[in-house]
Amino acid sequence: MRYAEVAVDVSTGHSQTFSYSIPESMELAPGHLVRVPFGPRMLQGIVFSLSPTSQVSDDQTRPVLEVTSPVPALDSLHLSLARWVSDHYVCSLFEAAAPMLPPGGRRRPRTYLTISPEVEDTKSLSVTGAQRRVIDEVERRGPTEIDSLVSRLGEWARSSVGSLVNRRVLARQIRTTKPAAQARFVESIRVRKGAKEEIFRWLFAEGRRAPRQSELITLLAESDESIGAVEARREFGGSVVSALIKKRFVEVDRAQVLRDPLEGRVFEPGERVTLTEGQRAVVSDVVRSLRDTERLPRTFLVQGVTGSGKTEIYLAAVEECLRLGRQAIVMVPEIALTPQTIERFAGRFPGKVAVLHSGLTAGQRLDQWWAIKAGEYSVVVGSRSAVFAPVSKPGLVVLDEEHEWTYKQHDAQPRYHARDVAMALGRLAGSVTLLGSASPDVGSYFRGRRKRYGLHLLPDRLRRDADGATAIASLPTVEVVDMRTELREGNADIFSRRLRASLESCLDSGKQAIMFLNRRGTASQMQCRSCGHSLSCGGCDVPLTYHRAAQRLMCHYCGRKRRVPDSCPECLAYRLSFYGIGTQSVARHVEEQFPQARVIRWDRDATRYPREYEEVLATFRNREADVLVGTQMIAKGLHLPGVTLVGVVLADIGLTIPDYRSGERTFQLLCQVAGRAGRGSDPGNVVFQTYQPDNYAIRAAAAQDYQGFYMAEMQRRHEHGNPPYSRLIRLLHSHTNNAVCESRAIELAESLRAAQRDADLTNVEVLGPTPPYPPRLRGRYRWHIVLRGRKPRELFERVDIPQGWAADVDPVALT
Ligand code: ADP
Ligand code: ZN
């Protein structure tokens, strides 16, 4: 095998690799990370396979330059998974494999300055004082980027660098960047084996002349243990330690320290419950498929309301998986990765749980990755990217809240969905996929009903009663209040009479309440009462939201802020006013109307950091606050037994978004919010305020009727031929000039339609081009084309998609 097939970090067609020759002395295996020449650059690559032949002629085949991972970073399982991802989501093999690599390790080419090899002795050069300082700095630091040099020395350094490069004292070198995170090692020193004799001789003969060295070496020799090199240097001085190393009396050990995010934390083992019959049925189904890798189905869907015991099922299934000597991956939506969730798994499997999520430091993430790779953990708990964790023998992959949109990466390649990746992993490794949700994705439920997935329903909400027995808790009652009637009957307040009365009695009885609003800010939008103009973001074409605390208008898409103008920018009238409501104004309303209530707010503005989430949550859970006001973040995964009332201030938000899935999304959100009420021993009460009380999604959510919703939704999907009755590929283009963007979109749509006619593909449609919502984002206009049909890929592959178009296979939203 003289050649390596390497996926290189450049954008290429999917599945493409390049041939490189392997130098004699190099040990190379599939999965190794390498550096290779590519055109004039040196790039990172991944060896996908070895081959006796090259794709190009011998004299055109260039060699692999360097191996950059100590061992292959990807095993054959993950190489195959990367091939699947590349093929399914139409991205390059490198892009597909990137989320499977050690985190923080992707390197980009940069220009570095080094002392030119022609210079033998920098001291003998005649240079200016400024140039001398630059040379010293580069000598001291090794290859240095010009910007970091300038930031250390000052702007004057730039011209000195220029003249030194011209004089060929400094050379420019293109190198890849340092990785964002690196493994951390600690060094320790110990007496070298077999050196004792010599040490004693030296001590006897010369020891008195070097008292510090004698003291340290005596200490080491007597204890026969190693001590930290850092501590030894601090205590005895660096020269003393170096002298002993030089004499070969001591040797240095390097050991990797693992930065473990759960280190030092003690978890309650968690009380074990006796599973109900319904729970046991799921677990035993999963176990049968775990034992027999030929057995179908390989995917199971549990539809159960919040509190129906899904997490207990995951715990039991994971336990069985570990017993069979295999590993488990448990994914939860990022937002639900609260300490509560981690505690439940870490408590059940002490010392075996690795966590992977965005809240970790780069170093922690890297260390967790290598520890998982080394097989030190058997359970990985994390968000969507955890599906790529380097487990060698996956047995079970769990997706909690499987309907969550955050399981799909939509903004960069690979635009993967963790559920589909989990199932691909299952086909490759024989693992079982377990999906759970109170309101499954209708596509998943559809496959469950068609027996492609094993489907289990858990209709009851469980709780343990006072003597530890399992009891069925009642589901909360939901009332729908028509806000149009309120208005007609003279109540213009943001709270209906019903909600106000419920809140009053909730607070009177010493219980807690949640006020939910799917929106941030105080008064959502500003509008001119004279001309009707509403203030929108200059870059995104969406209304700006007013934030009272900052007294600024803010765009919730791009984050741009602007001052509140005095007059309308359209008609110049001084008649701008606020309309709509936000979390801040809801909180203020509660405070005004219930002065005795302690109100706390939880949204992305109030809590920017994970630690603050925990604080807000702890305050509320410890009953130091009575009312929690928040956005959808409070809907997820929280178990708050003190809450008996949930008020949804406006249930309709989201229904107006022009997307075929807005009904499903609204239903799922409302179900989840409603599920926060009555999780303790007292029954829960939920109030939905809405202007569309007859909307099918709102009605089904109020009745907590998933099946009812499913039927209504599927009928709509069928009528319009939307998924799961079809598949979609969305092609998106953006440009600063709207006309250019549109004409390119028209051009591509035309060639797609021409290809469709030529090949006579009747079961695929070309929709658009149209501008998605919002039509402009961060200053760029957007146009998209959607391919819809049973096999949209057949058409997609017939057309060369020009550069600058982003393809999203199986998009979760068309916004
Ligand atoms: P979900 O994940 O569906 O929201 P959980 O697994 O968190 O549900 O269960 C909700 C509550 O019911 C938890 O407090 C859990 O300990 C309890 N529970 C779950 N299963 C049982 C059972 N079989 N017997 C008693 N209590 C249970
Ligand atoms: Zn914006």
Image: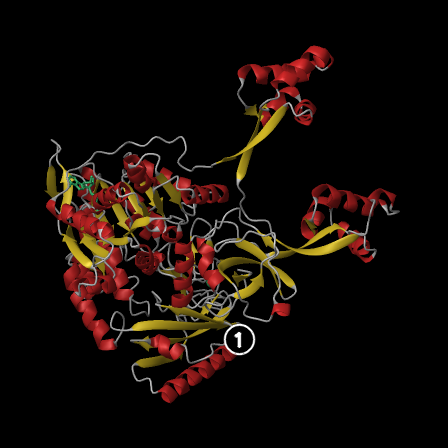
**Left or right of 464 on screen, residue 528:** right
Q: Position of residue 792 (x, y in %)?
A: 34, 76
Relative placement, left or right, of 639 versus 359 is left
Q: In which image quadrant can residue 620 be found?
A: top left
Quick check: is the Cβ at mark 1 less than 8 Å away from ligand 2? no
User: SS class of the residue under badge 1?
Assistant: loop
The residue nearer to you, when weighing 32 against 517, is 32
Q: Residue at x 17, y 42 (%)?
A: 505
The residue positioned 28% from the left and 42% from the top of the image is 322
**Image quadrant of ligand 1?**
top left
Q: Is residue 484 above or below residue 212?
A: below
- Residue that badge 1 annotates: 737
Q: Residues within 10 Å of mark 1 (few under 14, many from 20)?
A: few
Using the rendered image of the protein, determine whether residue 228 is visible from the camera's viewpoint: yes
Q: Is residue 633 left or right of residue 240?
A: left
Q: Which amino acid type is marked by label 1?
A: Asn
| Quadrant of the snapshot with the C terminus | bottom left
Front residue of this view, candidates 32 and 170: 32
The color scheme shown is secondary structure
Asked whether 113 or 100 is in front, the reply is 100
Residue 489 in view = no
**Front residue (pair 412, 78):** 78
- Residue 478 drawn at (x, y percent): 16, 53
Q: Position of residue 639 (x, y in %)?
A: 25, 42
Give above or below for 239 relative to 157: above
Give the percent coordinates (x, y) of residue 645. Answer: 20, 46
Residue 483 sits above or below residue 723 on the image? above
At a point 11% along the width and 31% down the height, the residue shown is 467
Q: How many marks?
A: 1
